Image (cartoon, rainbow, N blue to C red):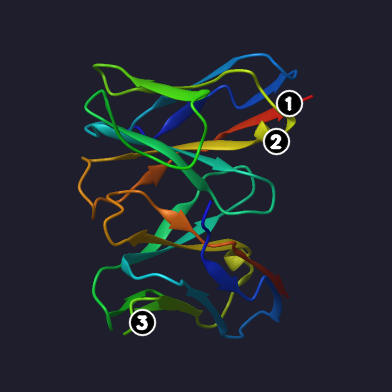
């Protein structure tokens, strides 16, 4: 099945650093979502974006819905050890109802 | 408020067998979606149930089937299991089937097919 292209695949950063990851699609999406998944758990929603150009923050997290509606990025500022995990972008394609299409994931590792 | 729960947490089956996975949706939610997450990949949409009716299906063969009950809990059934069916199966509930409704995920059932 289709998956969104997410990069980077993994990141190993120092505590306190800022992190950026992005997600691209070949088709237009009308919603972009960012989830975090910890080992042994299901994905947890971090940020939801519903309009092209929208920029939304949730604490240290900031995400944007690309103008072309084919991409989105997530920034994490001043990373801390509990930011470790796998981050997934997900989107709802136009005409796709409530079905979510997920990215391939970015694994974040934070060095103390 | 009770979150989404799934059972069992782990399961081992052999090729050709059948399996039933269960999901209890969050209180007040009438829509359940099922996803398959292979190791190292993102979840893939299997299907969604809204008020006991299938409301969308992904690219999965008919041996993947489901049910939703009047209390909005749900089952995923997989017949004639194949080795490639080994994965984490996630269910997610939402308030209704609307396209902007947030989906809340359960912890998943990890299925291993030998």
Q: Which residue is under mark 3?
A: A66
Q: How far apart are marks 1 and 2 (CA)?
A: 8 Å
Q: Is mark 2 on a helix, strand or loop?
A: helix
Residues packed near mark 1 inside 10 Å, few (<14), some (14 to 19) or many (20 plus): some
- The mark lying in front, picked from 1 and 2, is 2
Q: Where is residue A93 in the image (x, y as percent from the top left)?
A: 34, 61
Q: Nearer the viewer, residue A26 or B105?
A: A26
Would you place residue A14 above or below residue B95 in this image? below
In the drawing, does residue A102 fall left or right of residue A13? left
Image location of residue B19, percent across then percent down: 59, 17
> Is residue B28 or residue B49 the one in the foreground?
B49
* Cβ–Cβ under 8 Å for marks 3 and 1: no
Q: Do the residues labelled 1 and 2 touch (CB within 8 Å)?
A: yes
Q: Are marks 3 and 2 in contact (CB under 8 Å)?
A: no
**Tag 1, which chain?**
B
A106 or A38: which is nearer to us? A106
- The circle on residue A40 is none
The residue at which mark 1 appears reads as B113
* Quadrant of res A20: bottom right
Horizontally, is B55 left or right of A86 in the view?
left
């Amino acid at each position: 099945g289709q998956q969104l292209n997410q990069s980077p695949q993994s990141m190993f950063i120092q505590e306190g650093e800022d992190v950026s990851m992005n997600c691209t699609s070949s088709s237009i999406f009308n919603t972009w979502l960012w989830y975090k998944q910890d080992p042994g758990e299901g994905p947890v929603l971090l940020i939801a974006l519903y309009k092209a150009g929208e920029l939304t923050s949730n604490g240290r997290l900031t995400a944007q819905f690309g103008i072309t509606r084919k991409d989105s990025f997530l920034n994490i500022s001043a990373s801390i050890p509990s930011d470790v995990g796998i981050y997934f972008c997900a989107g709802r394609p136009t005409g796709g109802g409530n079905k979510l299409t997920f990215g391939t994931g970015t694994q974040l590792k934070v060095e103390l | 408020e009770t979150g989404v729960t799934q059972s069992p947490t782990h399961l081992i089956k052999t090729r050709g067998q059948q399996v039933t996975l269960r999901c209890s949706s969050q209180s007040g939610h009438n829509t359940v979606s099922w996803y398959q997450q292979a190791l190292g990949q993102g979840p893939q949409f299997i299907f969604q149930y809204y008020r006991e009716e299938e409301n969308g299906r992904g690219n999965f063969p008919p041996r993947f089937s489901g049910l939703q009950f009047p209390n909005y809990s749900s089952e995923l059934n997989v017949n004639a299991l194949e080795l490639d069916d080994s994965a984490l199966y996630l269910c997610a509930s939402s308030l209704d089937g609307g396209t902007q409704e947030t989906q809340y995920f359960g912890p998943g059932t990890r299925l291993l097919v030998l």
